[in-house]
Image: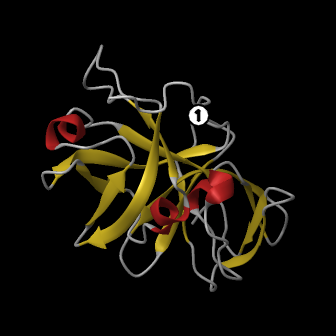
Amino acid sequence: MSLAAAEPSRPEDAVEVGRILGAWGVKGGLKVKPFSSDPQALFSSKRWFLEPSEAKPGHTVPPLLRVRSAREQGDTVVAVCEDLDDRDAAEKLAGARVFIARSSFPTPDEGEFYWVDLIGLAVRNREGVALGDVVGLIETGPHCVLRIQPADPKAGEVLVPFVDAYVDAVDREARTIVVDWQADY
């Protein structure tokens, strides 16, 4: 199996977008579990960078897969890749982490953001009080919730619903989010 051994290493802006679950079909297709309910990033790039699962020490995977086609199938993505010609080759990639260059993600609509773009942004309220930095998000179904870690490590995490009622502005270039929220909520 000659899976693009001379390809460049993973790009600096790469984001982990899924995991390979195993083979799909008998001709080397892959079944991938996307980390997003809308796996458009997996469809936007024909170059998937791989890293072995941390659960499989010593396991090697090719650094790059060139994707011929990918489609949704239920809550997974099924992909056909160059140089993966049989089920055994595809099964060997089970557990591999799939990364895609952030620069190849589809452009979000106005007012929409990728989680990866929000993590690390400084959050302050309307009065200019710093609440902390976004360290993650929680998917609750109807909307997401920002997880904000205050500068004081002893202070508890602040949770702010990521909805228009509480989020006034997101400025990715200034790396800030302004919210209608108080530190003691």
Q: Nearer the viewer, residue 36 or 161?
A: 36
What residue is drawn where x is 64% and y is 58%?
A: 104
Q: Nearer the viewer, residue 87 or 41?
A: 87
Indicate left or right for 50 with 95 as reference. Answer: right
Q: Give the structural element (helix, strand or loop) at label 1.
A: loop
36 over 28 or under it: above or below: below
Residue 126 position in % (x across, y down): 80, 72
Crowd tier of the residue under label 1, counting other residues whose Cα lies within 10 Å: few below 14, some 14–19, many 20 or above: some
Q: Choose top left, top right, bottom left or bottom right for residue 69.
A: bottom left
Residue 141 position in % (x across, y down): 36, 76
In the rendered image, the quadrant that contains the C terminus is bottom right
75 over 165 or under it: above or below: above
In the rendered image, the quadrant that contains the N terminus is top left
Q: Nearer the viewer, residue 182 or 5?
A: 5
Label 1 is placed on what type of residue? Answer: Arg
7 over 57 or under it: above or below: below
Q: Is residue 118 visible?
A: no
What residue is drawn where x is 14% and y is 56%?
A: 25
Q: Is residue 160 visible?
A: yes
Indicate left or right for 179 with 54 as reference. Answer: right
What residue is drawn where x is 48% and y is 71%?
A: 144
Q: Which residue is mark 1?
A: 10
What residue is drawn where x is 59% and y is 64%?
A: 114
20 over 130 or under it: above or below: above
Residue 99 position in % (x across, y down): 49, 44
Residue 118 position in % (x across, y down): 65, 58
